Amino acid sequence: MSGKAFRRWCTPKMIMVVMRPSDDPAQVFTAIQYAERSGAKLLLVQLSGRLENGKHSILSGLQGRGSVHADCGQFPPTDALKRAFVLKDVPIQQLSSIVRTFNIDQVVITQSRCPELATQPGLEEPLIAALNVPVCILGSGVHLNRSTAPGLHRILLPVAHWPEIEYSLKFAWSLAKSQRAGLSILHTCETPEGELAADKRWPLSVSPWLHSFTRGLSSHPPIEMWIRHGDPAAAIIEFNARKPHDLLILRCSPDRHLGSYSHSKIVAQLCSEMPCPVLVLGKSIRAPALYHARTQLRAEPLGMEV
């Protein structure tokens, strides 16, 4: 089942772009450009909601003629709008059934940049919790493009000590392979570096269980392994600032006790501060029991360093 799902997610045939009535057109254009890059068909969904200050529907503005004047500049029209399926005034509670009905392979959303809505809950957490397909979040740290979306050359997968590491790793590797991109595996360890044993702080001491996961993978795409200490979100952001990536992959476990990136605070911080999109395997995506069993047999700390 996982192999079939990975193929769908890595080479999507149908992507759903979700937008709010309050979204800036530049946000939506950036999301459409990102989704269009895959060559998939697009389903544009505008959520139901109250329009502020006499604003018109975001879809009405996007489907109008000529360029769109967004808050951060002028954006040209895109042919994707002519080819896309469009659903308007959709309650957020219906998104799960829409994903099933239209065989959606991936969902793309943007983090709200409207100051007036800063205190209101975003789309990220409810969609990550409800949808059984990857959710790609273009956070407030992502540059709003006025041209073609940048290519996918480097993928970053942060890992912690949790039973679904093999599932996350194989998905990230499959995506990197399909995109001919490099893959960086970053272990974030909250234990201070000085408290780790010397044999767990060097590249040559990478734990055998991680090697067992990567041994069956080909050398293409290339895989690099790193370790960082301290707060997980801060460590990921600092690492990416030194070594920029084009996509961050997170796995949110349905069980908060498994030690994966299940805490909404960490996900929210990464989405808002990372300059690249964040692709989240949400809580409704269940890994096969095989991955749990294999990893529990080989559970030991991961030791890697630059």
Image: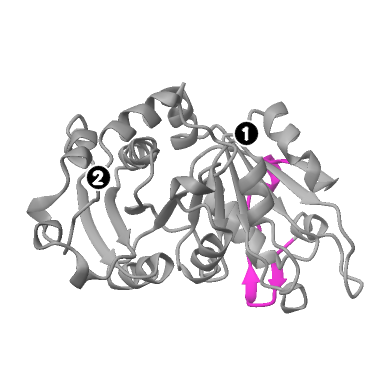
What is the quadrant of the C terminus in the image? bottom left
Which of the 4 image quadrants contains residue 234? Answer: bottom left
Residue drawn at the location 49% of the way across and 42% of the way down: 38
Q: Tell me if I can see residue 61 in this picture.
A: yes
Which of the 4 image quadrants contains residue 173? Answer: top left
In the rendering, which numbered label is found on residue 104? 1
Comes first in the chain, label 2 or label 1: 1
Say which of 75 and 165 sits in front: 165
In the rendered image of this protein, does residue 296 appear above or below residue 234? above
**Residue 280 percent location from the top left of the image:** 51, 48
Q: Is residue 102 left or right of residue 243?
A: right
In the rendering, which numbered label is found on residue 118? none
Residue drawn at the location 89% of the way across and 75% of the way down: 53
**Residue 40 percent location from the top left of the image:** 55, 37
In the rendering, which numbered label is found on residue 300? 2
Residue drawn at the location 19% of the way across and 55% of the way down: 303
Say which of 50 and 191 sits in front: 191
Q: Which residues are magenta?
A: 66-85
Q: Is residue 258 left or right of residue 33?
A: left
Say which of 283 and 41 sits in front: 283
Residue drawn at the location 28% of the way across and 49% of the way down: 183
Badge 1 density bin: few <14, some 14–19, many ≥20, Cα 10 Å: many
| Residue 39 magenta | no
Question: What kind of residue is marked 2?
Answer: Glu
Q: Tell me if I can see residue 220 in this picture.
A: no
**Residue 160 percent location from the top left of the image:** 35, 52
| Residue 75 magenta | yes
Distance Cα–Cα, label 2 vs label 1 = 37 Å
What SS does tag 1 mark? loop
What SS does tag 2 mark? loop
Choose mark 2 or mark 1, whichever is in front.
2
